[in-house]
Amino acid sequence: MERVRPVLIQGGMGVGVSGWQLARAVAETGQLGVVSGTALDATLARRLQRGDPGGHLRRALARFPVPAVAERVLGRYFVPGGTGREVPYRPVPRLGLRPNRARDELAVVANFAEVFLAKEDHNGPVGVNYLEKIQLATPAAVYGAVLAGADYVLMGAGIPAELPRLLDDLAEHRHAQVSVTVAGGDGHTIGIDPVGLLGRDLTPPARPKLLAIVSSHVLAAYLARSPRTRPDGFVIESPVAGGHSAPPRGRMVLDVAGEPVYGPRDEVDTAKVAALGLPFWLAGGYGTPGGLERAWAAGAEGIQVGSAFALCRESGLDPGLRRRLRAQAANGSLRVRNDLRASPTGFPFKVADVAGTLSEQEVYQARPRLCDLGYLRTPYEKPDGAIGYRCPAEPVDLYVRKGGPAEEAEGRRCLCNGLLAAIGLGQHRTDRYDEPSLLTLGQDAAFLDGLPDDYSAADVVAHILLGARV
């Protein structure tokens, strides 16, 4: 029987902010709980090195369909009792075009574990959110989520035109691949061979539904035009949504604070989206009872809510940082900038101004430029045809030697390390420094009105659904 579509979708935020605890809490209310699929290999590896408090990850890995693969991951990263915080984390294999079995095994197992834990012991819907920009991670990560029975896959930060075919193939354990953008080169792909990785004796899982996260009715129409690219629905994000956002259409204009100005060309024509015949949800400033009413009036199934869940008890944010964010948002002192320079991706990125984090220029300048995780680095073709990788957040001279323009590196923050630090998994750099956090949130704090001080995910759901006039 077809499951009733959710009214609320909990946003898949940051690295580990939308962890399995939050997604499960939302799904238990009957709404769509979503885990963030970004850098799950690193978060799993680091939590195992912390000793896996509560034993949750080991419980999930014990249910992985090929025990030998899960045992290899445990053997590489699990430390009984945990390492001390002064001990640097063991690195995980970097993303790349060259095949790497250990990297694929870790990615598949990590995504399986996160989705498995989010779905454990209830019947609510669970999804997983990925960034199209991180193409090198996509096939292995999505396969792990499919194996765990994810009900939905959501993808933004790009054009997920190849995801319908990828999901079709992975649900049948067929070799699956996506194209990879390589500067100066064409025809590159990254893929995964499920049979070669896990063997033939696996029952085909159910195919998740795909929701494409877009900010334009034009892009929605482009994806809906063909069965090969058509998702099962859309999340339509406005420019005030947290994390990355699309740049303004047309000539770039900045306001007095140096933030991009969005105009009429950036407004989504919801009537044209509705005419496509696919369900859609609105996101970015809709996380209130009134926002849900506006979404319904526009023909949407409901809304995606991020910031309200990011600050709830089950959020994966470091508890101290979460309390500071909530206090600043409640008293009106929180500023969230749409920073054109912060993200190495080139997309505008929402940065919450919080003392002691990478939002402060002094903290940013004191941190040595370093790119040792590499999720946002991009491939490029060298003159001899070999493939290299570069990131605007790495040391400027190194980036320039790799052919990157120096001006592109100005002001770039290391999102990979900063976002891991925000959930308490920042790297300790021996006697040099500990990674500072980077925090992101939506630019509309109206969601706090009517919520108790230390609220839960269930409080958010009840506040929005019960407060909306049906």
Image (cartoon, rainbow, N blue to C red):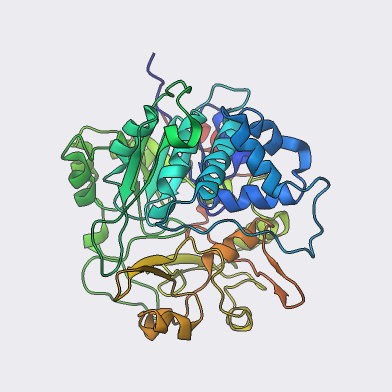
Q: Is residue 247 above or below residue 366?
A: above
Residue 384 visible in image: yes
Q: Is residue 12 above or below residue 429?
A: above
| The quadrant where residue 281 appears | top left
Give the image location of residue 456, x and y in percent.
Answer: 65, 40
Of 231 and 275, nearer the camera is: 231
In the image, what residue occupies the spot 63% across and 47% down? 44
Give the image location of residue 91, x and y in percent.
Answer: 63, 59
Question: Which residue appears farthest toward the left when viewing the image?
Answer: 225
Horizontal side of residue 216 vs 110, given as left or right: left
In the image, what residue occupies the spot 66% across and 69% down? 435
In the image, what residue occupies the spot 26% across and 46% down? 161
Of 364 and 182, nearer the camera is: 182
In the image, what residue occupies the spot 70% across and 36% down? 58
Give the image location of residue 233, x and y in percent.
Answer: 31, 36
- The image shows a total of numbered marks equal to 0
Quadrant assignment for the N terminus: top left
Quadrant assignment for the C terminus: top left
Residue 449 visible in image: no
Horizontal side of residue 469 vs 23, given as left or right: left
Of 365 and 45, nearer the camera is: 45
Q: Is residue 398 above or below residue 428?
A: below
Give the image location of residue 62, x and y in percent.
Answer: 66, 30
Horizontal side of residue 85 vs 26, given as left or right: right
Of 459 and 129, nearer the camera is: 129
| The quadrant where residue 313 appears | top right
Horizontal side of residue 415 vs 330, given as left or right: left
